[in-house]
Amino acid sequence: AQVLESGGGWVQPGGSLTLSCEVSGKAIGSKLLGWYRQAPRPEFVAEIDRDGTAVYEDSVKGRFTISRDSAENRVYLQMNNLKPGDTGVYLCAAYGPNRSFPLYNYWGQGTRIIVSP
């Protein structure tokens, strides 16, 4: 299984970035695809189920949008109105059947975003 993120970088406060993640191998078809921020333990940011149901951490609601392309085995995180507190390494994860007690999980290496003037 492979989970590969891309799209990180530097952006000024108020700016936007889109993160992309491609899953392959055993990670394909995972019930949930999610984004976490590494700090020092992964912090939940957003996840999306196969049926399109999305859940967000409170601080990103209204600013971030997660989407899933099952045909391409990809998950995206559109990040708008970025704040310095959003700075960090963002990890993509494929897991199931739920976030609290996953029976399987696959993680990427992460992509770094820096939000700074």
Image (cartoon, helix red, strand yellow):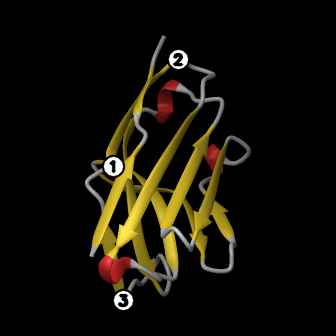
As shown in the figure, which amino acid type bears the numbered disc 2? Answer: Gln
Q: Looking at the figure, which quarter contains the N terminus?
A: bottom left
Distance (Cα) linking label 3 and label 2: 38 Å
**Which quadrant of the figure has residue 64?**
top right
Tell me if mark 3 has few (under 14), some (14-19) or many (20+) residues whose alpha carbon lies within 10 angstroms of its own. few
Judged left or right of residue 98, residue 6 is left
Reading the chain from its start, which is encountered first: label 3 or label 2?
2
Q: Residue at x 40, y 36 (%)?
A: 8
Distance (Cα) linking label 3 and label 1: 21 Å
Q: Residue at x 35, y 73 (%)?
A: 24
Q: In the orientation shown, which residue stands out farthest toward the right?
A: 62
Q: Secondary structure at mark 1?
A: strand
Q: Is residue 37 above or below residue 115?
A: below
Judge depth for marks 3 and 2 and give the one in front: 2
Judged left or right of residue 32, residue 49 is right
Query: Which residue is denoted by mark 1 in the rendering?
Result: 38
Judge depth for marks 1 and 2 and give the one in front: 2
Query: Which residue is denoted by mark 3 in the rendering?
Result: 103
As shown in the figure, which amino acid type bears the numbered disc 3? Answer: Leu
Q: Secondary structure at mark 2?
A: loop
Query: Which residue is denoted by mark 2 in the rendering?
Result: 12
Q: Is residue 83 above or below residue 50?
A: above
Reading the chain from its start, which is encountered first: label 1 or label 2?
2
Could you tell me residue 104's position as x and y percent? 34, 84
Reading the chain from its start, which is encountered first: label 3 or label 1?
1
Q: Residue at x 34, y 43 (%)?
A: 111
Q: Which mark is residue 113?
A: none
Could you tell me residue 40's position as x and y percent? 27, 48
Could you tell me residue 112's position as x and y percent? 34, 37
